[in-house]
Image (spheres, helix red, strand yellow):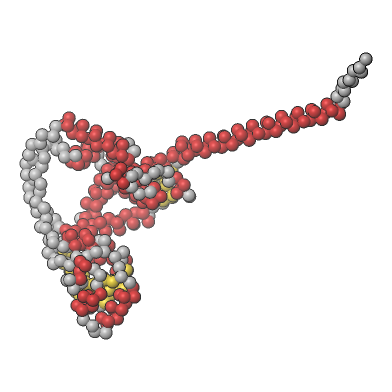
Amino acid sequence: MARQKQQLRPTRKHLARAERERILKNRIIAGTLITAILVFSLIGYGIYREAVVLPGEPIAVVNGEEINTREFQDRVISEVQFSGVTAESIAWAVLDTMIKDELVRQEAEEMGIVITEAELDQRFEEYLGYYRNGTPTSLPSLTPDPTRKAEETLTAAAVTALPTTDVTPTAANTPMPNPTPTEYTAEGYEQAYADYISGIEEQSGLSEEQIRQVIRSNMLSEKIREILKQDVPLEGEKTQLRQIMTDTEETTQEVRLKLEEGEAWEDLVTEYSQDATTKDAGGELGWLASTIILSGFGPSAELLLTEPVGTLVGPIQTYQGWHVFEIMDRATQTFTEYEYQQAVNSAYDDWLSVVEGNSEIMIVENWEERIPDVDVPESDAYY
C-alpha cells in the first residue's frame, strides 16, 4: 500500500506570523484608503473654495467697504469679452477702476449726491433714443474750433500745426425749444431696452443689475465733475511751441547743439524732423494749454511750462520719438472747448487723488491669483 502523505499542521509560530501579515495588510489598505480620502477631500475643498468660498471673499477693502472677488471676476471677464485683451493685462485696470468707483460712491454720499432710479432709467432712454415727452431739438453747439482735432491728436503726442481760434467753452443761454413728437412708443422702448440688456448680458456675462451699477458709477462721476467745473476758470496760461522730432536721442541732441551754435531752425526742421504733421509748418504746434502739454508729452515736459520764452527744451521722449522744443511765447488766453474739458478732467483727477490719499485701501495679498481664467474671443467676436 502507498503511504499517505502526512498533512502538516500550522504551528503557533506560523499562525502568529500569518496574523501579523493580515493585520499589516489591513493597515496598508486602510492607510491607502485614508490617504485617498484626504487627497480627494483636499481636491474637493480646493474646487469648493475656488468656486464658492473665494468668490464671496473681498479682493479689496475701501474705507471698510468690501469689493467682492466675484464682482471683480465678472468685470474682468466682461472686459476681456469686449476688448479682446487677456485677463492678466486688464485685471489691474479693472480693480483700480472698481476701487475708484467705490471712493466716488462714498464721497458722493457724503456730498449728498445720489442717482435715482428715475435718473438711471432716463439715461437708458436717452441712450436708446426714446424721449417720453418727444425728441428735443438739438441746442446750438459751440463755435467749431479748427484746432480741436489737432489737440486731440496731441494728447497722443502727435500734434498738428493749425491756426488757433479760441471760443468760450459754454453754450449760449438759448431757451429749450419745444420737443417734437416721436413715434418711438413706450412698448417699443421696453422691447429695445430688453434687447439691449440681453445683448450685453450675452456678450459680457454681466447681469442687468451689474450693468446698471456701472452706468450709475459713471453718472456719479459726471455729477461730481459738474460741481468741480464751477471752480475751473475759462482761461489760463498757454504756451506757444515749436518742435523738431527725430528717431533717436543722439540725433535730437545733435539738433539741439546745432541750434545752440546758431544754425537756422527752419533748415534743421527740413533736414531732421520726422513728424509729417508739423514738418511743413516749421514744427509749429501753436498755442497749447498746460494740461494739453502734460498729457501729450508727459511729466518730462513740465519744463515747457516753467522755462522762459526763447529756451530750448529737450531731448524729451514720447512714444512717437525724441523731441527738442523751442518756447516761442507765453500768455493768458481763453481756453478752447477741448482745453477747457481737459482742465475739468485734470481738476477731477486731482480731487480723486486727494480722496484716494486720505482713504484706507487694502488689497489682498496675491490678488493676481484671483484673476479668472478666461479665453480671449476671436477678433470678430467683440466690437
Quarter of the image holding residue 180? Answer: top left
Q: Residue at x 64, y 33 (%)?
A: 34
Q: Is residue 5 visible?
A: yes
Of residues 370 and 247, the one nearer the viewer is 247
Q: Position of residue 347 (x, y in %)?
A: 26, 58
Using the image, determine if residue 16 lies above or below residue 42: above
Q: Residue at x 11, y 53 (%)?
A: 141
Using the image, determine if residue 159 lies above or below residue 258: above
Quadrant in the picture for the N terminus: top right
Q: Left of 377 or right of it: where is 344?
A: left
Quarter of the image holding residue 43? Answer: top right
Quadrant in the picture for the C terminus: top left
Using the image, determine if residue 269 lies above or below residue 195: below
Q: Position of residue 49 (x, y in %)?
A: 49, 38
Using the image, determine if residue 86 lies above or below residue 195: below
Quarter of the image holding residue 267? Answer: bottom left
Q: Residue at x 10, y 42 (%)?
A: 136
Q: Position of residue 90 (x, y in %)?
A: 37, 50
Q: Position of residue 2 (x, y in %)?
A: 91, 17
Q: Residue at x 25, y 75 (%)?
A: 272
Of residues 192 and 249, the one nearer the viewer is 249
Of residues 48 and 341, the one nearer the viewer is 48
Of residues 10 and 36, the one nearer the viewer is 10
Q: Is residue 308 visible?
A: no
